[in-house]
Amino acid sequence: MKLEQRLFNEIKNGRLAFKNLTQIISTPPFIAHNKQEKKTVRLALKLLEEQDKIVCDRKGRYCTPEQLGVFCGKVQGNERGFAFIKPDGGGTDFFVPRSSLNGAFDGDRVIAAHVRGTEDEAYIIKILERGRSTVVGTYERGRLYPDDLKMPEVIIPSPLSLNAADGDKVVCEITAYHKNGLPAGKVTEILGEGGDFLTEELGIIRAYGLYEQFPEHVLKQAAEVSAEKIRVDGRKDLRDKIIFTIDGADTRDIDDAISLEMRDGNYVLGVHIADVSRYVKYKSALDKEAYARGTSVYFPDRVLPMLPKDLSNGACSLNEGEDRYALSCIMTFDKDGNRTGAEICESVINSAHKMTYIDVTAICDGDCVLREKYADIACIVDNMKELCLIMERRRQGAGEVNLDVREAKIYMNEDGEIVIPDYERGISERIIEQFMIAANETVAEFLLGKEAPCLYRVHETPAPEKAQTLASFLRDLGINAKLDSENVKPADFRDILNRVADRPFAAVVNKVMLRSMQKARYCEKNLGHFGLASACYCHFTSPIRRYPDLFVHRAVKAVLQGNRNKLQTYAEISAQTGIDCSERERVADEAERAVDDLYKVVYMSEHIGETFEATVSGVTNFGVFCELDNAIEGLIPIETLPRDKYEFIAEKFMLKGGKNCYKLGDRLKIRVDNCDFGRMRVMFSLDG
């Protein structure tokens, strides 16, 4: 019997220290008295540890993972030195004090064990995978001071500094982690002088591992495929149909176009989506790069596209007056909004107009000048509005959770100034939303009916504890919500939103409801979409900027072409593709929010000392968050509130004092005090 197996057999019977193990096996042929023999035992134990068959507990005793009750999870660091671990299987997060981190940092995957005698404390046994290979921060005298305060300082030897000057914002690659010391690294990119606005923005972008440039071989392939001339080649020729696009005024990557005809009192709606899969072939250089990116990422002053511009702004974009390949989903709806028929086909289209949301809304509102300018589509737009309202009523009846969560619209004008207007959403945005939802459902049901692979967009039922918290919050507002926390239905949430629609705290209820819901993700299994009250849903309408949509397009075309081999291939990769695309979406969302926060802080730095009306949007044990009418949020620190003995009541979203009380939905008059660029946070105080 090998030494490793004998050691493992002994350890399985109970936890044993190294000394005990050497004594137990110190009979022929395993003699462990001298240094060489002890070294042999240590090497055998190390091999067992590397195979994850054994672990070493806090007292230096060897045991099996099962004996110790270990679990795997991801570290969530805190700038104050401690951390939490989110177990892989879900459930309660575990607290890890600084002394028990064992060299782990934010983002690392680890093996940890529950501390006996505590409710939720753990210690880290082993680091399985480092969460970060690069860090962004400020270079000072041979050290990198990370922007992310959850990360440690990094030692940078002078020869590896790229001659960075003190105060420069740099990207640093970590070259070595040390168990009981600071990691070492080297500078790989100098972004510019720290404190400069554009440098800070670029620093955030790099911190999330995002880059503007494409590899040369990818750009070359994009240029080659985009030069292809458009040919009908058996596709449905829809170039004689009135088809047009509706997007933001500055949109350059146009995925979707729409058309609408009236036939025998029915609405024949066409949703025509750029056929990106015609150009981006599976496993090509373009495909591999698109998969690695997962999604386009949008910032106020730039876009980091999933595909090179030759495709995203060129050959794939449904530009006005140009022939384009498309996948068309042509649906028939009756006067009640019921879908009575559908056809999905490969097509060639030519967009008649590049319409903007603002102009389409104005046409719907009766703007005579625009109705005359776009006389060929004015009546079509009227019918689109009519169908949109029918669809909205039908979805409301089905229980759709139509959350109205405000998001600040941030952009830079021609003078390079940051503009953040008050929140507004017009009928044109609603038209596009309803039509895209309809197409996404139709395509998902088509693939499900064909038993073909699909990446479904799933949104699962809220967890019971989150539903209970929501119900408790509503009761405090005087709303007796009938929620079965074990069996929440979309219609329950819809009814709550309808009841609070005209109340002053409606926006806050929307936000709390959003927090109670699970995060949507991509999955190879059809688990339904709770928020849309949809039994079957996918993303089909944005293949220029989302990889899951490109996957769905390939599956649809494989069905249309009867290609079973491709369907089998797509089925085999669907599960992992869903996981990877969900993760890339999460990273993109976080990066966009972080850059938006920078813009908001810079914008509000021009308004220090001014007063505004605001709504309490969040309550914590350290203060009260308030939201302005343009959706910018700021913090009133608890120490600046009127003197009182405050108690934070988390389940009621309330900060309660003896004389003063602050809760979600309260309207306050605030003053902008300052802007914390370190935490990207606007600081408020009560006015008066």
Image (tube, grey):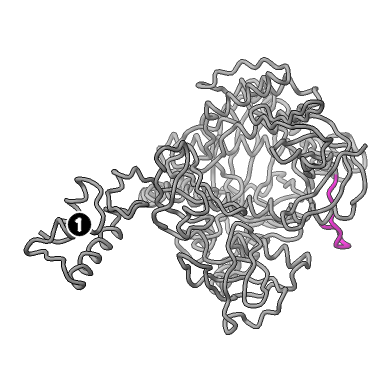
Q: Closest to the observer: 99 or 5?
A: 99
Give the x, y percent position of residue 244.
Answer: 73, 46
Name, please, the residue furthest toward the left: 28
Stretch in magenta: 411-421
Give the x, y percent position of residue 217.
Answer: 53, 73
Looking at the rendering, in which quadrant would you find the C terminus? top right
Looking at the rendering, in which quadrant would you find the N terminus? bottom left
Which residue is pictured at 84% across the width and 39% down the height? 629
Residue 379 location, quadrant: top right
Chief secondary structure of the magenta portion: loop
Q: Is residue 459 visible?
A: yes
Q: Closest to the observer: 498 or 182?
A: 182
Compared to 163, does 598 lie above or below? above
Badge 1 marks a residue whose secondary structure is helix
Which residue is pictured at 69% across the width and 32% down the height? 648
Compared to 108, does 660 lie above or below? above
Q: Which residue is mark 1?
A: 21
Label 1 Cα neighbours within 10 Å, binned few <14 / some 14-19 / many ≥20: some
